[in-house]
Image (tube, rainbow, N blue to C red):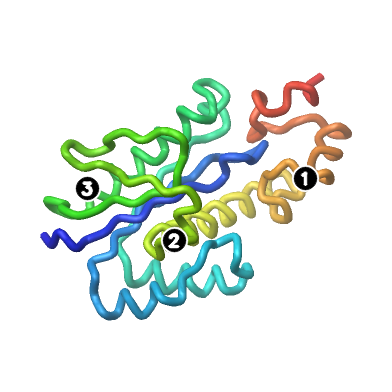
Amino acid sequence: MSKNYIIGIDEVGRGCVAGPIVAVACLSRGQEDEYKILVQVKDSKKLTAKKRAELFELLNNNFIWAHAEIDNKEIDKIGIQPANCLVVEQAVENLIKKIENFEGKILADHIGGAHNYIKNTKIEFYIKGESKFAEIAAASILAKVYRDKLMQEWHKKFPVYDFAKHKGYGTKQHLQIIIEQGICSIHRQSFLTKYIK
């Protein structure tokens, strides 16, 4: 396996008050067809939903990637920072299961805790990494679109909360609904202590 291989990692949903935190690890093998896609990739927050969806399909069909998610109950149990580190570790482990004898770099957006997730392989953490490395931005897009789809499914079960719109973030509208309706089974109670009756 080439030492030019790069795994990009990013997570989404850390700041949400509902739903899981999701991490994606995406492998770039340095191939020409991958490069043509990566030059189109930017930080998912700077893309329209339509463009993210288009890039998700390209990335999904041309890259090896894996995800992990930790639900709201586990986040409440262990805390958001440990959950953030754990979900990244699980995403990397899930990707490594799909490839053999990985050698190369692992790049991640800074999550506040740098340690080895794979024996003898260090993750390089970068502040605003998704703006600096296309591999991290690719993981960011995959994670964002994947999680948004999850929240759209939760919207069908709990339409009153309008999860399809705010995706579980603590918007003014979302918090007002919580005040009026209370919380549901996917809300993070540890994030909403002043709203829980």
Q: Is residue 30 above or below residue 102?
A: below
Quarter of image, res 193? top right
Left or right, residue 33 beside residue 154: left
Q: Is residue 69 above or below residue 50?
A: above
Looking at the picture, how far across and down is residue 61, in whole percent? 36, 71
Q: What secondary structure is found at the residue carrying circle 1?
A: loop
Image disc number at residue 171: 1
Left or right, residue 40 beside residue 170: left
Q: Which mark is in front, 1 or 3?
A: 1
Q: Earlier in the sequence, mark 1 or mark 2?
A: 2
Amino acid residing under circle 2: Lys
Q: Earlier in the sequence, mark 2 or mark 3?
A: 3
Q: Is residue 23 above or below residue 3?
A: above
Amino acid residing under circle 1: Thr
| Residue at figure coordinates x 83%, y 44% from the top left | 172
Image disc number at residue 132: 2
Image disc number at residue 97: 3
